[in-house]
Image: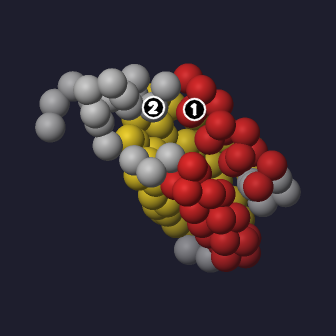
Amino acid sequence: MHELFIYYRSQAQHAQAVKTAVAAFQHALRERHARLEARLLRREEQPSLSITWMETYRLTATADAPGIDAALQAEIELLATPALAGLLDGRLHVEAFEPCAS
């Protein structure tokens, strides 16, 4: 069980489309998974040229489900990939980390 980080790049001109697409599929995910916390972060690489985006996902832990499992990770990736098609420079990078301290 872990937290999930998905990062990718886009041209700055696609910023609004990326934000809109991510907001829509993160909303859909939160509707299906009440304990899911999802965020979208951005870092401009060169002003007005490109942006690195980071999506983060975690579940509020309970005794029976402490984090994101393989099935939820696959669902997140399945929604993200087509929603962002044509907006990215390169591909999605998915990383999973296990919390070890608070």
Residue at horizontal 50 percent and vertical 46 percent from the top: 33
Apparent side of residue 33 relative to residue 99 in the rendered image (left or right): right
Residue 101, horizontal then vertical, whole percent: 16, 30
Viewer-proximal residue, 91 or 48? 91
Snapshot quadrant of residue 71: top right
Picture disc at residue 51: none
Which residue, as the protein is rendered here, is positioned at the far left?
Answer: 102
Percent position (x, y) of residue 54? 51, 52
Mark 2 closeness class: few <14, some 14–19, many ≥20 residues within 10 Å: many
User: Do we see residue 48 in this rendering?
Assistant: yes
Q: Secondary structure at mark 2?
A: loop
Which percent across, then down, holds residue 34? 45, 51
What quarter of the picture does the N terminus occupy? top left
Q: Looking at the image, tell me whether mark 2 or mark 1 is earlier in sequence order.
A: 2
Q: In which quadrant will I find the C terminus?
A: top left
Residue hosting label 2: 68
The mark total stands at 2
**Residue topped by disc 1:** 73
> At 33% across and 24% down in the image, what residue appears?
64
Q: Is residue 61 above or below residue 25?
A: above
Residue positioned 28% across, 33% down in the render: 62
Does any portion of residue 97 appear in the rendered image? no
- Judging depth in this view, the residue of 45 and 77 nearest the camera is 77
Position of 69 with respect to 71 (left or right) is left
Q: Residues within 10 Å of mark 1 (few under 14, many from 20)?
A: some
Amino acid type for the residue under numbered disc 1:
Gln
Amino acid found under the numbered disc labelled 2: Ile
In contact (CB < 8 Å): disc 2 and disc 1: yes
Residue under the image location 40 percent in, 42 percent down: 58
Q: Secondary structure at mark 1?
A: helix
Residue 21, how many percent across, how many down?
Answer: 69, 64
Q: CA distance from mark 2 to mark 1?
A: 6 Å
